[in-house]
Image: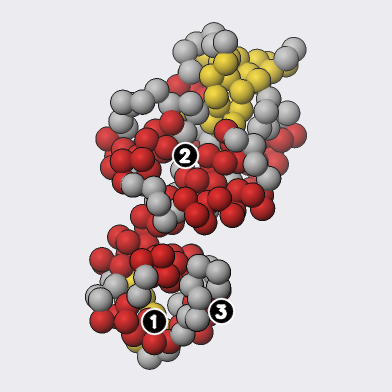
Amino acid sequence: MKIRKLEELLETVFTEREQGRDQVESVLAHAFEGHAPDKGPEDFRELASLGLVQFDGARIALTPEGEQRASEVVRRHRLAERLFTDLLALDETQTEQQACEVEHVLSAEATDSVCTLLGHPPSCPHGKPIPAGPCCAAFSRTVKPLVTALAALPLGSRGRIAFLAPRWAERMDRLASLGVMPGTIVRLKQRAPSVVIESGETTLALDPEIAAAIYVKPVA
């Protein structure tokens, strides 16, 4: 089996599990045909022979090795989505097309560099979690990040909001109602006990947990 097809199938097992689905038929139905041509049950039997998946009747699960391989592909895809959306401003269709290509070619070193440049984002533009990599655990800063958490800005400095990654959708709505949304330029005035920012003529005090969901690109 070609590596690209193998990775696509492992990725689909991973993403289907996120949706609460673990049936072989569901994985087959959702595997992208362009990257997994002529897919069929025999492909999963081959993945099982490679020690990447295991079966329980009609259900399929990743083995520890398969989990690692799938997580790496998903990480590359979702980091690419952040890169193309937040920094290159591509539309959703272009972003998805490019991310589907990049996920198969980025080296581990390049993936960590992209992650660091983006400030180790916790989620993709669709709100799905990005699996952490070694650079996230070590908080590596060998490359100056282009995007950083709001509270990591030096006091008094400004940043353009790149993306929001709240844990709950209602917080996204709350931030939007306050005018805190991607593209807005804010200035960090205070970190504790509340995170205080200025946006235009408006001063806002944010709960630190809410502020932690705001990521910015520093501006002069």
Distance, label 1 to label 3, CA atoms, is: 13 Å
Residue type indicated by callout 3:
Ala
Nearest to viewer (mark 1 / mark 3): 1
SS of the residue under disc 3? helix
Q: Which of 104 and 76 is in front in this view?
A: 104
- What residue is shown with label 2? 121
Provide the secondary structure element on which disc 1 rests.
helix
Q: How many residues crowd mark 1 within 10 Å: few (<14), some (14–19), many (20+)?
A: some
Q: Earlier in the sequence, mark 1 or mark 2?
A: 1
Q: Which mark is residue 29?
A: 3
Residue for badge 1: 43
Q: In this view, does 61 lie to the left or right of 26?
A: left
Q: Position of residue 32 (x, y in %)?
A: 55, 70
Q: Earlier in the sequence, mark 2 or mark 3?
A: 3
Q: What residue type is labelled 1?
A: Asp
| Earlier sequence position, callout 1 versus callout 3 | 3
